[in-house]
């Protein structure tokens, strides 16, 4: 099964209350699943990676064998493609986890940067995680 994952992280006040969201689509573009997770206090870049992890883990649970990750975080996508180095020590373990998860699939398309407007559903999930969290 091939799944396209749109992921997005949100952090209010950066760092601040953060959420991760992902939307998983089949090959025809139909929504298979929407997931979100409240992350506590973290940075936007950490939330972006956590959202990718959430989407990849969900795809594995759903039995996906092939995936493509799409995100509006140019930094994360370029780091995953090897175009940028991961300089911040707090991002390195998250980067490593995303790379490890990608390698659990039979194959994966290179991560792709998408415009914010094309990632609205994942953004809504990330913000829903923050909005619905009540301490």
Image: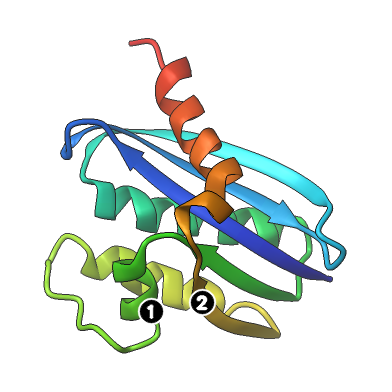
Q: Are marks 2 and 1 in contact (CB under 8 Å)?
A: yes
Q: On the image, numbered disc 1 is attached to which residue? A: 80
Q: Nearer the viewer, residue 37 or 30?
A: 30
User: Does label 2 or label 1 sit earlier along the sequence?
Assistant: 1
Q: On the image, numbered disc 2 is attached to which residue? A: 111
Render colour scheme: rainbow
> Which of the 4 quarters of the picture holds residue 39?
top left
Residue 117 position within the rendered picture, expressed as x and y whole percent measured from the top left: 52, 50
Vertical position of residue 125 compared to residue 32: above or below:
above
Residue 51 position within the rendered picture, expressed as x and y whole percent measured from the top left: 45, 51
Q: Is residue 93 left or right of residue 27?
A: left
Q: Residue furthest left?
A: 88
Residue at 46% x, 50% y is: 8
Residue at 47% x, 37% y is: 126
Q: Residues within 10 Å of mark 2 (few under 14, many from 20)?
A: some
Residue 35 position within the rendered picture, expressed as x and y whole percent measured from the top left: 61, 40
How many angstroms separate mark 2 from mark 1 (CA)? 7 Å
Residue 79 position within the rendered picture, expressed as x and y whole percent measured from the top left: 31, 78
Q: Residue furthest top?
A: 134
Q: Nearer the viewer, residue 55 or 25?
A: 25
Q: Secondary structure at mark 1?
A: helix
For the question of whether residue 54 can be seen, the reply is no
Vertical position of residue 24 compared to residue 120: above or below:
below
Q: Secondary structure at mark 2?
A: strand
For the question of whether residue 78 can be seen, the reply is yes
Residue at 43% x, 59% y is: 72
Residue at 82% x, 61% y is: 26
Vertical position of residue 53 compared to residue 83: above or below:
above
């Amino acid at each position: 099964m091939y799944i396209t994952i749109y992921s997005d992280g949100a952090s209010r006040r950066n760092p601040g209350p953060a959420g991760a969201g992902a939307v998983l689509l089949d090959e025809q573009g139909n929504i298979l699943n929407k997931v979100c997770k409240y992350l506590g206090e973290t940075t936007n870049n950490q939330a972006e990676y956590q959202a990718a992890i959430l989407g990849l883990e969900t795809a594995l649970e759903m039995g996906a064998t092939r995936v493509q990750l799409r995100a509006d975080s140019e930094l994360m996508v370029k780091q995953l493609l090897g175009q940028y180095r991961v300089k911040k020590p707090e991002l390195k373990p998250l980067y490593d986890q995303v790379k490890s998860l990608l390698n659990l699939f039979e194959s994966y398309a290179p991560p792709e940067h998408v415009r914010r407007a094309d990632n609205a559903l994942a953004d809504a999930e990330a913000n829903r995680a923050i909005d619905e969290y009540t301490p």
